[in-house]
Image: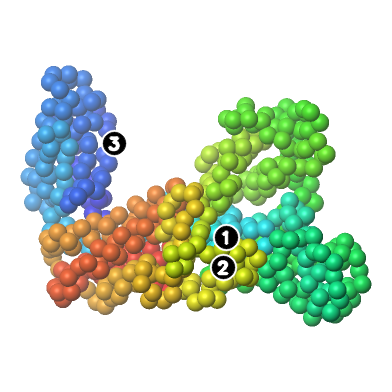
Amino acid sequence: MLKERLYRAVKDALAICRAEDLVPDVGVPVEIVAQAGAYATDVPLLLARRSENTSGTTAARAATYAESLAENINAHDAAPCVATISDTGTLFLRPTPAAYAGAVRATVEAGESFGTNTAGANRRALVEFVSANPHTPISLHHARGAAVGDALSHLLTASGYEVEREFYVNDGASASGLRSLSRAVFAAYREHFGVETGESDADFYTGEYVRELAEKIAESSGNRYVDLSPEAAATAITPAVLSLMQDGQREILARLGVSFDRWFSESALLAEGALQNVMDALLASGAAYAHGGALWLRTTAFGDDSDRVLLRNDGTPSYFAGDLAYHADKLQARAYGLAVDVWNADHEPYIGRTLAGLAALGVADVPSRLKIAVYGTVRPVQDGTQLRGGRYAGGMVSLREVLDAGADTDALRFALLLAAPTPSPTDLNVDTLAPNAPGNALASVRAAIAQGTGDVQIVETIDRDDLCAVIRQVEAFAETVTVAVATVSPGEVARWAWSLAGAVNRLPDDNAPETAAATRAAGVVLTNALRLLGIVSA
């Protein structure tokens, strides 16, 4: 990589200048950062700050050190750059035309491996995402979580982790909601057989999916439940409703290109005593205490802003308690080296208490082993107006409706990843999601890839500013992947790809060998980027 060659040039010059007493013999980190038209390093300034020499100003000393380093770099005919200095001592590194051409060749030769790394060292990683309640269809904002989680899984795999994907089925905490859905399905089931029904005490569950569930139960079971009371019927059909809802969630997520290694049942975890084990451990350690008829956890002792309820006055566990048991299972019982949670922004307040709760349980290395990606809600917009009251899901716009309306699945995934990296709601213009629709961001990336197909004529130098700018963006791909994994923000890769595609699409169609070489390198890394985002039909 070009930055690695620049790094080595600075390190070599630093070593020589130290040996010649031209710079102080003190340790400083060497970091190379991209600048407009060049790269730069603050090594001279760091030397000046750490030097025992106090003559003159820090800036003046830095400028002197920078001059020595620049002279050493420029003295070598094979140097990958021309070094210049600023008045304040910043060392600018302008790659040579030969270095830019070499970066293109290296990128094309690396092919699919460009951008991958082995930082994960085969550590086992679990990515838990979507985990929608089992009593509602997959919504568009669930789809954003699906896009984020699946892309993170691909990026972690490309970074040397052994990755598993998990959907956490909230069939414990959401049992009451699931039962309400079952009562609504029973009302539709009776209507299916022409039997008048009383009011459905589940007003929220009014979408067409309720009728679909009723029809499927009628098809498989006939009218055997018609004469039951609503409560008895809810008990009888809830297992079937849960199974059908999960089938529907699997099917629509598969249409988005997302699948899971495991659907992990909350109720099964609790039935195995995981929650009780956590309570016992916290009580034994003194981290939990009784107050006001409830059981509390001293999360303030571990950095949280207040203590949290584990068991309510009536003895029922809080959402936090069940979630803590699940995280303990992932990090202790199943001992994953890394666990990644993909959460909607409304769960963000739970981050501090979750970290504190795990610390109270004595889970080792929590900050490095648990990463939480937070994304904001998606607001679908069409013709400039926010869509409301989805027909299928009864009050929300579902993923199924958007896909059935003709959205390209890859374009949708890319748009969801491209959205601003904030927990605030993001507008998604569904008019741009059809293949070749104006404003389709993925179409722009695909157009840039198309320009870089075919064999590349080897060129020895590239010195056009527009092509060099493209090559610097190409070079940034590997670092972008590293940052995206470290910050659990796959949108970094999507936004990098969109920016590079824009630069490629603005290049002149001049058939010059240099242009063909640069666009070929861009095509390689853009193809890699889409693959690492889970978008394979590049």
Horizontally, is 37 left or right of 533 in the view?
Answer: left
Q: Which residue is drawn at 86% across and 74% down?
A: 196
Disc 2 and disc 3: Cα gap in Å? 48 Å
Residue 136 versus residue 323 in the image, above or below: below
Instruction: From the top left corner, tell me how far across and down residue 429 is, in percent.
Output: 44, 65
Q: Which residue is drawn at 81% across and 69% down?
A: 187
Instruction: From the top left corner, tell me how far across and down residue 524 is, in percent.
Output: 31, 68
- Mark seen at residue 29: 3
Q: In the rendered image, which quarter contains the C terminus? A: bottom left
Query: Could you classify mark 2 by the number of other residues whose Cα lies within 10 Å: few (under 14), some (14-19), or many (20 or more)?
Result: many
- Mark seen at residue 399: 2
Disc 3 and disc 1: Cα gap in Å? 42 Å
**Which of the marked residues, 2 or 3, is nearer the chain's N terminus?**
3
Query: Could you classify mark 1 by the number of other residues whose Cα lies within 10 Å: few (under 14), some (14-19), or many (20 or more)?
Result: many
**Which of the marked residues, 3 or 1, is nearer the chain's N terminus?**
3
Q: Circle 1 sits on which residue?
A: 142
